[in-house]
Every structure is written in C-alpha cells, then in structure tokens.
Amino acid sequence: MISLVCMAEGFECGIDAEVCETSLIVEYRLTMLHPTQKKVYPYQGKLYRYDVKDPENATSISPEEVITADGWEEERLVIVANGSLPGPAITVYEGQRLVVHVINQLYTDTLSIHWHGQPQKGTPWMDGVAFVTQCPILPGQKFTYDFVARPKGTYWYHSHVGTQRTKGLYGALIVRDRTDNMAEHNLLVQGWNHLWSADMDQLKYITNGIYENRKKRRNSFQLDGDMFSTVLLTSVIINGRGRYYSNFTTEANNAAPLSVFRVQRGQTYRFRVINADILYPFRVSVDNHKITVVATDGYDVQPVSAESFIIQSGERYDFILAADQAVGNYWIRAQSLEIEPDRLHRAHAILRYDNAKEIDPVSSTYSCSVSSRCLVVNCPFLYYPEGDFTDCLSVDKLKALVDDDPAHVPSDRQIKEYFLNFGFPGEHGFGQASVNGRKLKLPPVSALTQPLEIESTCDRADCGEEKECECTYSLSLNHDDVVQMILVNMGKGTGGFHPVHLHGYSFYVLKIGYGFYNNITGQYIGPKTDDINCRGSGDERTSFCNAATWRNQSWGGDDVPGLNLLNPPRKDTLILPNGGYAVIRIKADNPGLWILHCHMQVHNVDGMAVLLNNSFDRIPKPSKNFPICHNFPTARPDVVPTTTPALTSQENGACVKQSENADGQYIVVTVGVLVGVLFIILIMMAYILYLRNQVKKATHSSASYVLETHYQH
C-alpha cells in the first residue's frame, strides 16, 4: 500500500500497489507572489523580485514556486489544490484502488471533486457532483474519495461546485496501461481572465454582457458565423503558464515564463491534452511536427495523422509526436477559434529538445496549400473557407482501434430512444439555458442518497412542449436497457455549439448530423431540418423543440441512416454542433444518478443539464456515515434516506439534525435507560437500609456485652 500526501509536482502510484492513497489540500492562493521573495514581475521569460531595477544583471526567481498564470502583475485570487495551478497530476495504473483525501481549507467556499471520465461503477456516490451524488464539502471538512481507477486513459479531476473549476481547481488524472512504456507529457489548456473571477463572468453572462468605456462589448465569432457567449478572456494558459498579449497583431506581450516540454531527438512521446476552459475550444498544433491522434476521452482510436485538432471544454485528446526534427525549440500552440484580429487568443508552450538553448522558439505554423492541405480533427463545423486549404474530420468519423467493442444491440432490438434539445428557448427570444425547455434545479440534498427529500421534480412544475420551466429534470432508465439519446441543438433560442458531457458512462458516438453550411465560405446556413422534426409551434427556428422526433417516422434505433455500429469511437464529452444533432448509445448497466450537461461552465451553472436515474433499485449503499444535508427546517422531517445510514449530531460530516424517527428512537432508549437506573437505585437504597439495621443490632449487642463485662468487674 502506498500512502503519500500529494505534492505540487504530482503523485504517481507504484505499479505493484493495490491501493494508492494521496491528498488534495484545497486553499486560496494569489498569482505572481513568491512564498519568500514576495511580489514578482516577468521579464524575458523569467521572474524577478518586485524591487529589482536592473533585471539584466540580477538573479531571477524560479517560477516553480509561483502561480504565474499569464504573468499579469496585479494579483488574482485563485482556488488550487496543493498550492499549484493546475493541481498536481495523479497517476495510477488501471485497476488500482485510488483513495484521495480532499481537505477544504477555504475560508468561505464549499467544494466537491468530480473525477471526469471515470465511470464509478459500483461507487456512484464517489462521482463528486454537489447536490447530485453528495453534499458539498464545507470549509474545514475532509471528504475521502475511494474508487477503482478504470479504464486506462486520460482523465482529469475538477471542482463541481458553481464556477470553481475555472478559478484553478483542476488537474490531470492519468490511468496508465501497465504494458505501455512510452514517455509522456500532460498538457492542460485553459482560457484566463486576469481582471475578474469566474463568478463575475457568470453574472455578466446572465445580466446582459460586458461594458467597456460606456459601450457594450460585442461578442466574438468563429469562422462559420457562430457566436461565442459573453465570456472575457485576457489570455490562454498551458499548465498554468502563458503570456498576456497587449496586441494580437504585433504579438507584443509581457514575456512571462512558459511551460516547457522536453524531448530527446529520436524518441517518441505521448501528449495527453485536456481542455479545462470555461467556454472556448482551442486548436492545438506543434510547429514543424506532424501529430498523430491516437485516443480521445480515454479510448484508443485508429491513428490519424493531422496538422492539428480542436479540443472542446471537458474533452481529452492523446497524440503521438516523433521528435525527429533538428535540435532546437519549437512552439506548441493552442489558439481559440475566434476570427477577430483583436480576439484571436492564443497560448504558447515550448517543445525543447535536449541540448537546445533555453530561448524562445522562432518557428512558424505549417503553411497549408493547395498541394499540401492541412487536416484538422474534431471541427465543430463542416468546412474551413476554401482558401484556407484545410479539411475537417468530424469526431464521428474516427474509428475505435479494434473492432471488438461494437455498439450495444439488444437481442429483441428494442432500443429506448430519447430526444434531448440543448438550447435557450424563450417566449420572447433567448430564454434560460435548458434541456427540453427544463432548466435544471439542483435540490438542497444529496439527490442520489436522499431521493425521498427531493421536492422540485418536474411533475410539480409547469413544463410542456412550448414552455419553459425550472425543476429537477430526470429520466428513469431501466437496468440493462439499451438507450439511444439524440442530442439536438435546434429550435427557438438555438445559439452556438455545446460540448455535452455524460457522467457514469463512455457512450458510443454513432453519428453527428451537422446543419447546412456553405462549402465555399464555411458559413452556417441553417439547421438539419431534413432529419429532425422539432414539432411544436412553427418550424425548427421558432419551435421550442422540447419534444423533437425523427422527421422520417421509419427511423429509429438501428434504423437510422449513417450509424456506425461496428467500431464507433467512445467518448464522455462530445461536440453538439449548431443546428445539428448527435446520436449516442449506452447500455444502462451502471446503477446511479448521472448528470448529463453542457460542459461550458456558464451554460451548466445556468441549468443546461438533465439527470439520468439509472436502475434506482440496484444502487449500492454508500459507506457508513455518508454525509447528509438539507434545508432547516427540513421539508420532510419524517424521512430517513433509504440508501443513507442515519447520523448522530456528533458524527463527522453530519450537517443536519436527525429525522423525527431517529429522535423518537433516541427518546425511547433514553426513557428505558432512566427507568432501569431508577430501579437499580431503589434496590441499592433498600439494601443500604437493611445493612444499617444490621449494623445497629450488632452495635447494640456489642455495647451490651461491654457494659455487662464492666459491671462484672
């Protein structure tokens, strides 16, 4: 057994260990502050103490002990694990039991940690979603996550409370294959805003935008004409480091330190890339090097050689890089898809060969041409403009590495099918973020372990085909059913694309149906009305699309044209294109309560989610003394959770008083004990009186004998 406190540089479990134990201490930190040298500033890729006047002739400060982010000199408050941004990587081997003690040392914030991509089979209460699978961890509390890490692949952990993730509380979770000895690097990319926190981003997003110099800031766009939500980026960081560009055209920047990935010429490396951003996708490439995409979201795919790939929030892509170029330094690039020259946010990191000088690279991106076209994997649209000489490969065109994992097909061919529309339908235009017009309202309890206390179910709300409502939206799945979900992005209030993430499963990606695009300009034209019927009022642009179905009524289950049932890729986070749809499939064999949501943080927090109630009668019981929580006074004082043991007020993690049933049991026991004690006291008093009488008799006899003897003498 290995038991270590996870340090900032990461935790790696021994290959032969059965149990891997570590800790994440969550606390506030400030950027651009050294623990002993205090305030620092960037200069030519290095850091210097705030009072150094001549950095050319001064000793620099190691950036290893500083959270630099984009090097902006004014401090920004971050929430991090073990003092680092991103948090320390946790590396284990497939099948090992992972035990992580999460200690909340924040002053005012609750938290929970989600293990993104881990199915949590048999341990659904370890999924780490506050008010879905557990109560949030209060300041000063510790919560121990305990589960088996599987399958192998690239995963990550992050806070699942509010906007906390993009304040810095995230890190890589790598589950290694014992037979794979290839050298590897983790690369985590995140958009950054050094002016204000993600909480303010969320409020500005829902309250009419950002204003600068008494003017409303315009939204940015990508090349197909799709608009990004109102979220401000000042920069982009890779593994917690980046640069602030004061001018994107001239690339003038503050020369802050960057992340460096070292390679040896002639060797091959696996890069594990994770997008931890609040909203934006990034196009990732390496100058002068072809990359070979070999896995996505932990599952291997048939290798694809590409110039670059696009990674959405929550997604992971693994690529293989052959270090076959001249010894030197080369840019690793992560660039947003924005088309405005003053909005083209980018991050740089350095690919540095052994024995290369420690200087910035001077390399350039690959020049795509009519004779040497570029291939981009995982585009959220169908085409780049004709003059870009760039082709798109959508994710549903990837194929699983081997053909031994086909999509589930039930013996009776009975497939349960659900249409779920992700959008912003509203009576007067754009409304609230929702799924099928239902904005998810999280209950004030741990929904998985306190289900009988949920009072915000949708049958109590005014929901309907052409209505908006707010409720705890859920779908009940029977055990072992084959479930096909058609994720839709159409109807009134449609806006942009959505990276949709499912907890508890890695689904089969059978098909993505894109909207209509101009193949010359790449511009979006309209929704895929040939395939999807939104029903409701009007057409696919005016209906709320809360009750969509196939346009062709003969479609359904396996009988949908274009499905890949033989070797589809498996993912847990998938791009849902504007005006399009995606067909995904699972076998409902993982009992639990699993959230399906848009992974854009602003959309998720605003309610674009639904819960999958999978085989409730088969959900395993959580550990003894699993925390409970609810309002005070509770709406259901007579209820004791069916899957949660009752707690006493002294037990660690209890956050509420007992139910009346528990109080009644306590009173009965107490009265019984008191009656017993009184009975014993009465017996003892009677016995004492008896002894006193015996003593008096003995004393009287003795006194008589003495007196008699005296008088005889």
Image (cartoon, rainbow, N blue to C red):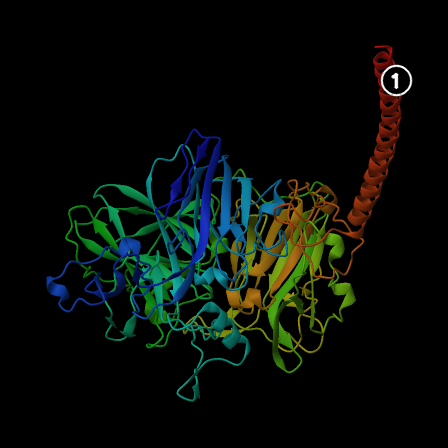
Q: From the viewer's perspective, tell me whether residue 414 is left or right of residue 285.
A: right
Is 351 rendered above or below residue 425? above
State the residue in front, 295 or 35.
35
Q: Judge by depth and name the residue closer to the eye, 712 or 671.
A: 712
Whether residue 63 sits left or right of residue 27 in the image: it is left
Name the residue at 25% across, 48% down.
Answer: 262
Is 239 drawn above or below residue 148 in the view shown? Answer: below
Q: Position of residue 138 (x, y in %)?
A: 56, 56
- Residue 78 location in percent, x, y? 41, 62
| Quarter of the image where the C terminus is located | top right
Kind of residue at badge 1: Ser
608 or 369, which is in the foreground? 608
Which quadrant of the structure image shows residue 69?
bottom left
Residue labelled with disc 1: 704
Viewer can see residue 524? yes
Reply above or below: 248 against 580. Answer: below
**Total numbered labels:** 1
Q: Nearer the viewer, residue 661 or 644?
A: 661
Residue drawn at x 20%, y 68% is 51
Question: Percent x, y for residue 417?
Answer: 69, 55
Label 1 SS:
helix
Q: Residue furthest top?
A: 713
Q: Position of residue 283 (x, y in %)?
A: 37, 62
Query: Is residue 561 in view?
Result: no
